[in-house]
Image: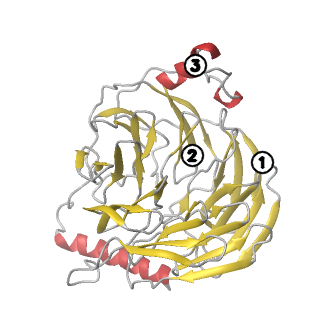
């Protein structure tokens, strides 16, 4: 029922927008202009993994836990382990399920969920199935994996703790689901002995990991307006936890900083985003619902900068790549912005298809998965140079093997041009 209601909302919204002006497009996406790169970014490799197609906001984002591999899932049911440095596939397992959330990775397990409510755990070593359970609710976000418990959020407003050993249910909590909400769910985040998750009613809830008891709950937005569309308050993106602080943003709600021990709000600013946020020591970065990239002061939430050049380009949530904020858009472009000023630094293409889920940054590389199934790896030239320096110049001990330098970087591109075609890894 939740899926049908969300689909109805999207159709209704499309109708209302079209009805506003049948002659011209309303608030169209910003057109990209030629960009003289300020930093050099290399495409290290790109490979087509298959399993793509026109899908509606599936929560399939690459994940990494160890030092050598990425783990990727597609809607056709395949789960893959991919070498970070080369893009080569180490193993591929077919679950024969319409996968829609994950993977969540940790402690030797890769866990994925499906549109039909199945949750499957595979071995990170060889992809062998460890267990499979039916939890009866669509999964649109990556499960959180601890040594003993796997936590799964479903679109019916339930958060479940499953045994990592065999998948049997240990506990479940439930929140009321509004009649209308943005398609998607927030991924749960494990922080010490609690798991923290946002819900479609605008609440953030902390649950004890072992017992499943609610430790605290905090509303970061309140419904207001005359219509159900105006009253929507929805948290669809994972919180970001750093030490004793929890950062969250919601659609038609607020961006806020909470105390991890009590859920007390330290600061809150009006904001609207269903794509998530990133943070460093100075600022909190988010992609707004209107497609602008925004930086807020981490200490008090005061605005620092706003970049409107990507307005309405259906941006992913931001991630941090060294001194840059990285987002991708509906045409498969990946954008690097200066974290201090918001200035556009570089742009690279993928296969021209939409990128729904946030890029992944690990080992000084940026990994982007398009909705058509192309996985691409990028690296800044300065990160490449640092990895190539002799060990005594960079660290007391040699860097890990997976940080070995890839081929020499290509010249930076001056775009927009048609996105680069993917190349088999």
- Is residue 390 visible to us here? no
In the image, 368 versus 284, the foreground residue is 284
SS class, disc 1: strand
Badge nearest the viewer, 2 or 1: 1
x%, y% of residue 126? 82, 51
The quadrant in which the C terminus is found is top right
Could you tell me if residue 232 is visible in this image?
yes
Q: Quadrant of residue 268?
A: bottom left
Q: Which residue is mark 3?
A: 394
Judge the density around disc 1: few (<14), some (14-19), many (≥20) Cα neighbours within 10 Å: some
Measuring 34% from the left and 53% from the top, which residue is drawn there? 287
Q: Secondary structure at mark 2?
A: strand
Mark linked to residue 91? 1
Q: Earlier in the sequence, mark 1 or mark 3?
A: 1
| Front: mark 2 or 3 | 3
Q: Residues within 10 Å of mark 2 (few under 14, many from 20)?
A: many
């Amino acid at each position: 029922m939740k899926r049908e209601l969300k689909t109805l909302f999207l159709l209704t919204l499309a109708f209302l927008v079209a009805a506003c002006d049948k002659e011209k497009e309303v608030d169209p996406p910003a057109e990209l202009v030629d960009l003289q790169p300020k930093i050099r970014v290399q495409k290290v490799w790109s490979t087509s993994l298959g399993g793509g197609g026109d899908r509606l906001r599936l929560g399939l984002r690459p994940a990494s836990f160890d030092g050598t591999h990425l783990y990727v899932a597609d809607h056709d049911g395949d789960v893959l382990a991919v070498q970070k440095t080369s893009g080569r596939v180490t193993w591929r397992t077919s679950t024969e399920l319409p996968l829609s959330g994950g993977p969540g990775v940790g402690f030797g397990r890769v866990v994925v969920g499906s549109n039909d409510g199945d949750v499957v755990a595979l071995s990170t070593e060889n992809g062998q199935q460890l267990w499979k359970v039916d939890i009866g609710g669509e999964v649109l976000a990556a499960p959180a994996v601890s040594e003993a418990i796997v936590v799964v959020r479903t679109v019916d407003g339930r958060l479940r703790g499953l045994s990592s050993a065999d998948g049997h249910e240990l506990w479940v909590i439930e929140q009321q689901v509004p009649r209308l909400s943005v398609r998607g769910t927030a991924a749960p985040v494990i922080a010490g002995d609690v798991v923290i998750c946002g819900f479609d009613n605008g609440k953030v809830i902390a649950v004890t990991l072992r017992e499943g008891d609610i430790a605290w709950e905090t509303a970061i937005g309140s419904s207001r307006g005359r219509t159900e569309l105006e009253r929507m308050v929805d948290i669809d993106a994972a919180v970001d936890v750093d030490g004793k602080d929890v950062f969250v943003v919601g659609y038609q709600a607020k961006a806020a900083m909470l105390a991890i021990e009590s859920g007390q709000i330290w600061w809150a600013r009006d904001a609207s985003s269903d794509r998530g946020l990133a943070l460093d020591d100075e600022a909190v970065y988010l992609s707004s619902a209107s497609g602008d990239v925004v930086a807020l002061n981490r200490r008090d939430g005061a605005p620092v900068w706003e970049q409107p050049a990507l307005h309405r380009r259906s941006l992913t949530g931001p991630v941090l790549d060294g001194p840059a904020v990285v987002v991708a858009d509906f045409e498969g472009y990946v954008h690097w912005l200066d974290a201090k000023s918001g200035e556009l630094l570089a742009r690279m293409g993928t296969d021209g298809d939409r990128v729904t889920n946030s890029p992944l940054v690990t080992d000084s590389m940026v990994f982007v998965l398009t909705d058509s199934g192309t996985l691409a790896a990028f690296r800044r030239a300065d990160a490449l140079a640092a990895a190539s320096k002799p060990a005594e110049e960079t660290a007391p001990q040699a860097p890990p093997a997976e940080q070995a330098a890839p081929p020499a970087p290509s010249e930076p591109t001056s775009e927009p041009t048609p996105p680069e075609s993917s190349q088999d890894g």
